[in-house]
Amino acid sequence: MLRRGRGSIVNVTSGAQMGIAAMGVYAATKGAVASFTYTWAMELRDSGIRVNALSPQADTPMGDATTEYFRAKGLQKPTAKQPPAETTPRWSNFCCRTRRRA
């Protein structure tokens, strides 16, 4: 990517990066991915490489646990849960040179 002067890196994190009871290691690793993404975005911005992180909210037992956590704290999750078929087109836009509306 550096030689070509362009590219796209897409990392996956989750709302758990904000911390979640009984899931400390998972939350810490997702927080590390987010921090790594921010750092790479700053380091690579002048080289033509885009770096983004996506934080999907999936319909899974773990997703349900994060919903309960946010609810218990009186917070609202940043995004609504969506099935993969609806989120995949949006994700693919991060990898394209020219973005399309999904």
Image (cartoon, grey):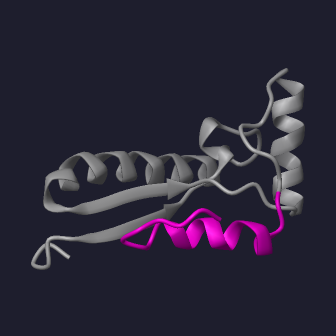
Specify the farthest residue to the top: 74
In the image, the segment drawn in magenta is 82-102
Seen from the viewer's position, the closer of residues 33 and 91 is 91
Residue visible at 28% across and 54% down in the picture: 40
Q: Residue at x 21, y 52 (%)?
A: 45
Q: Indicate whether residue 23 is drawn in magenta.
A: no
> Looking at the picture, how far across and down is residue 58, in whole percent?
80, 61
Q: Nearer the viewer, residue 101 or 30?
A: 101
Q: Quadrant of residue 50?
A: bottom left
Quarter holding residue 59? bottom right
The answer to whether residue 74 is left or right of residue 16 is right
Horizontal and vertical percent for residue 43?
A: 19, 50
Q: Is residue 101 magenta?
A: yes
Specify whether 73 is left or right of 12.
Answer: right
Quadrant where the C terminus is found in the figure: bottom right
* View extreme (left): residue: 3
Q: Is residue 78 left or right of residue 65?
A: left
Check the image and report above or below for 91 versus 62. Answer: below
Image height of 96 relative to 58, above or below: below
- The image position of residue 39, as x and y in percent, is 29, 47
Q: Residue at left 83%, top 67%?
A: 83
Residue drawn 14% across and 60% down? 47
> How many numbered marks have been drawn onto this rendered protein structure?
0
- Name the quarter where the N terminus is drawn: bottom left
Q: Is residue 46 above or below residue 49?
A: above
